[in-house]
Image: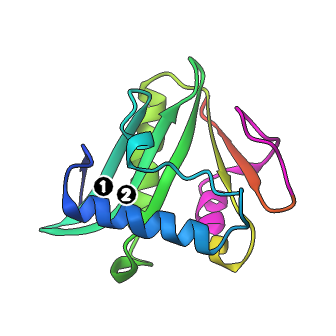
């Protein structure tokens, strides 16, 4: 598996991103999807990585810098053909390493509730993320959850 920065130009990456957005909309109540689309991921404050095995995309994930001390994990998605192979864990480690290299003190994420979100929640909690308060522009609801990881 090779993890590399992704400029979002490949058809494979764009297809996986479309799959991610469709999944978020299918498993979230209206008004509770905060996943970034292609244009949202192309902003200067976001870095995207993708994992590959040859020509096959395995997964994607992104780091959004919120301020000098905090970042947010965005757009984590493993391709359905490659679940439970360590793809998401490897991408998450790359995001955490980059956040530390940038001197960030905390990584946060927003996600949903319900069966579709349980595998991701298990991954984040295994890595040390803990439930906490809303951050940035997010507002809490009965559906969304906020997790945080101290990096210092």
Q: In this view, does 145 lie to the left or right of 81?
A: right
Q: Position of residue 143 (x, y in %)?
A: 80, 62
| Magenta stretch, residue numbers | 119-141
Q: Name the residue under label 2.
A: 60
Place of residue 1 in the rendered image (x, y in percent of width and height, measured from the top left) = 23, 64
- Give the distance between the C-alpha atoms of the residues marked 2 and 1, in whole angstroms: 4 Å
Q: Say whether residue 1 is visible.
A: no
Q: Can you tell which mark lies on residue 50?
A: 1
Between 8 and 89, the one nearer to me in the picture: 8
Which is more N-terminal, label 1 or label 2? Answer: 1
Residue 126, quarter of the rendered image: bottom right
Residue in the picture at 66% in, 64% down: 121
**Mark 2 closeness class: few <14, some 14–19, many ≥20 residues within 10 Å:** many
Tell me which residue sits at (34%, 82%) in the image. 81
Q: Specify whether residue 138 is painted magenta.
A: yes
**Helix, strand or loop status at disc 2:** strand
Q: Is residue 22 left or right of residue 121?
A: left
């Amino acid at each position: 598996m090779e993890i590399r920065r992704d400029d979002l130009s490949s058809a494979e990456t764009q297809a996986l991103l479309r799959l991610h957005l469709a999944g978020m909309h299918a498993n979230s109540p209206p008004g509770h999807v905060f996943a970034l689309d292609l244009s949202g991921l192309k902003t200067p404050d976001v870095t995207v990585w993708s994992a590959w095995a040859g020509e096959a995309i395995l997964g994607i994930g992104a780091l959004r810098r919120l301020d000098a001390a905090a970042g947010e994990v965005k757009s984590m998605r493993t391709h359905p053909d490659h679940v439970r192979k360590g793809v998401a864990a490897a991408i998450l480690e790359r995001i955490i390493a980059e956040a530390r290299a940038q001197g960030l003190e905390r990584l946060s994420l927003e996600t949903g509730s319900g069966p579709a979100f349980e595998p991701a929640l298990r991954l984040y909690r295994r890595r040390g993320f803990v439930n906490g308060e809303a951050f940035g522009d997010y507002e809490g609801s009965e559906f969304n959850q906020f997790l945080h990881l101290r990096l210092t």
